[in-house]
Image (cartoon, rainbow, N blue to C red):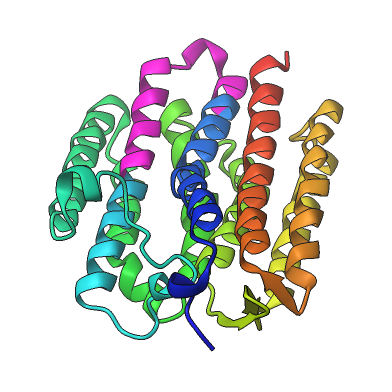
Amino acid sequence: MSTIASSRPAHQSNSAIRVIKYALFSASIVPSFVGAAFAYYLSPAEFSLINAILAGLGLFLGQSAGDYFYFYGTNFHSNGQDAHTKIFAGWKPLLTDSFLGDRGTLWAGVFCLAIDLVIAIYFTYAIGTEIIVLAGLGALVAIFFTPLMLKGYKEIVIFFTFGPLVLVGLVYALTTSYDHLADAVLLSLPLGFLITVVAYLKGARYEVSTENDKTLVLKLNKKVITVLTIGAYVGMAVLFIVGILPLWGLLAFAALPVSISVLKVIDQSKSEINAYLWAVVRAISALVLTGIVFTLVFTLNP
């Protein structure tokens, strides 16, 4: 058995990892757009584009802070559970090589949270102190994500954070109403499941092997990916059944073939590394496509 870092076809694998590195920000960007669009749909007369932008920036910086703390924690205080020693060996957050340096990632995370604190103070004055609870939960996730991940709670934390917490926080911040928070939770479920699929594919425990000069991924828990994928599309159907999505919102199911193509790669007992990495890219694409449809539905629906 050998590690990915020493045996993968460097050019193709590194290209896929670069795409994944930047596309992972869809975890905060996609829910930001969907949440803002839903808030606009609920209360167009009171919708504030500035508040929507600030809320989205806060989510983006919160995800960035979590990435910086995760990199710092797993590179300088790491153990065998560090997924970066496996399929994403060499992965680094934005600006780490060009500006921050490895140890500077700690202060980059602190800086991101400091800006988020300013944004939280603004919303506190703009809409009330209730927002502090939601902002505080987000900050705690960013700070404690690494120890939670190392204890095996990564997927649960990501689902809760980028699913219900983000959508509920956004809808409340942009509407200042409790009336549709249950709808926001339901709307968050397909996004949360799709984001968690990506998180699991990126950070799951793997075994790798080299056969015939090809690096293969072995023993991935396929049931987890299947259940999460089914959950996403069942969640979409529920949104239609309860009336949150109009009929043309079912265009979101256009992402289903993309998700199925991911499952086909994962279902193999041995997946070639490049096929696996590009399956991760397609999993992100399914999330983005779903987010685009949801955003258009709520922005354009009368």
Residue 104 lies in quadrant: bottom left
Asked if residue 178 can be seen in this view, the reply is no
Q: Is residue 44 magenta?
A: yes
Quadrant (top left, top right, bottom left, bottom right) of the C terminus:
top right
Q: Is residue 132 above or below residue 123?
A: below
Q: State the extent of the magenta-drawn residues as a range.
A: 39-61
Say whether residue 175 is left or right of residue 206: left
Residue 285 lies in quadrant: top right
- Position of residue 92 measured from the top left corner of the image (x, y, whole percent): 32, 56
Asked if residue 211 can be seen in this view, the reply is yes
Please tell me which residue is depicted at 53% across the width and 61% down the height of the picture: 199
Q: Which of 73/250 is in front?
A: 73
- Position of residue 14 measured from the top left corner of the image (x, y, whole percent): 48, 54
The total number of labels drawn is 0
Please tell me which residue is depicted at 44% across the width and 74% down the height of the picture: 6
| Residue furthest bottom in the image | 1
Quadrant (top left, top right, bottom left, bottom right) of the N terminus:
bottom right
Q: Is residue 65 magenta?
A: no
- Position of residue 219 measured from the top left corner of the image (x, y, whole percent): 66, 83
Say whether residue 141 is left or right of residue 75: right
Please tell me which residue is depicted at 73% across the width and 68% down the height of the picture: 266
